[in-house]
């Protein structure tokens, strides 16, 4: 029996995933990945919006946490930049076809997507309670409503990528 996959990531027989997103959405993702790259390379490392990307490692010991950040920050940034580059490359090389992601590509795509969502959530001051209740507390005419919808869409896209990998048994 063949599994029905209704999400944007379709498992292929060769172990890859076809990304079924419109060209507009792909272009938006490439743009957002570029924005993320800019924030990581030119942003102030102490900027509050970046704190969710580089969380505190030692809550009870500020000195140890400062040392950890000093030692690991450049490696974490390099890892994020490599993931962004690969995600953009996969989307850009598709040339009006569905981008094909290997398992490793999918992981890097998810890492980059999650980073964008963390930054956007921080800028919008989204809390865990907001997410659990599925509410953003905004009126229909609030100018931030589109950003909250984007945040929710990115969450759905991240969930769909995780589900695709879980269905294949790559994530347990």
Image (cartoon, rainbow, N blue to C red):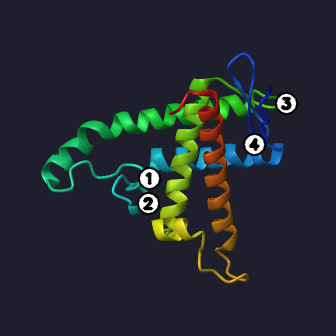
Q: Mark 3 touching mark 2, by CB under 8 A?
A: no
Q: Answer with left or right where residue 136 lies relative to residue 91.
A: left
Crowding near pointer 3: few (<14 within 10 Å), some, many (20+)? some
Instruction: Compute the Cα span from label 4 to label 1.
Output: 34 Å
Q: Secondary structure at mark 2?
A: helix
Q: Answer with left or right where residue 170 lies relative to residue 74.
A: right
Q: How many marks?
A: 4
Please identify, in this view, whether the residue under mark 4 or under mark 3 is nearer the observer: 4
Marked residue nearer the N-terminal end (4 or 3):
4
Q: Mark 1 touching mark 2, by CB under 8 A?
A: yes
Instruction: Compute the Cα span from label 3 to label 2.
Output: 35 Å
Residue at 20%, 49% in the rendered image? 66
Q: Which residue is mark 2?
A: 49
Instruction: Compute the Cα span from label 1 to label 2.
Output: 10 Å
111 above or below 2? below
Q: Which residue is mark 1?
A: 43
Q: Secondary structure at mark 1?
A: loop
Quadrant for the N terminus, please: top right
Q: Secondary structure at mark 3?
A: loop
Q: Which residue is mark 3?
A: 97
The mark found on residue 7 in the picture is: 4
Marked residue nearer the N-terminal end (4 or 1):
4
Please provide percent x and percent y for residue 65: 20, 49
Marked residue nearer the N-terminal end (1 or 2):
1
Instruction: Compute the Cα span from label 2 to label 4.
Output: 30 Å
């Amino acid at each position: 029996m063949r599994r029905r996959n209704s999400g944007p990531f379709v498992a292929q027989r060769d172990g890859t995933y076809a990304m079924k997103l419109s060209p507009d959405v792909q272009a938006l993702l490439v743009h957002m990945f570029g924005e993320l790259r800019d924030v990581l390379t030119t942003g102030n490392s102490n900027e509050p919006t970046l704190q969710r990307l580089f969380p505190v490692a030692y809550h009870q010991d500020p000195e140890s946490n400062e040392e950890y950040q000093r030692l690991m920050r450049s490696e974490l940034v390099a890892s994020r930049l490599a993931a962004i580059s690969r995600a953009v490359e996969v989307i850009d090389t598709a040339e009006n076809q569905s981008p094909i992601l290997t398992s490793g590509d999918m992981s890097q795509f998810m890492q980059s997507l999650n980073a964008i969502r963390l930054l956007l959530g921080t800028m919008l001051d989204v809390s865990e309670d907001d997410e659990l209740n599925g509410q953003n507390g905004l009126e229909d005419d609030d100018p931030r409503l589109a950003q909250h919808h984007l945040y929710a869409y990115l969450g759905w896209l991240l969930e769909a990528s995780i589900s695709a990998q879980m269905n294949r048994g790559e994530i347990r």
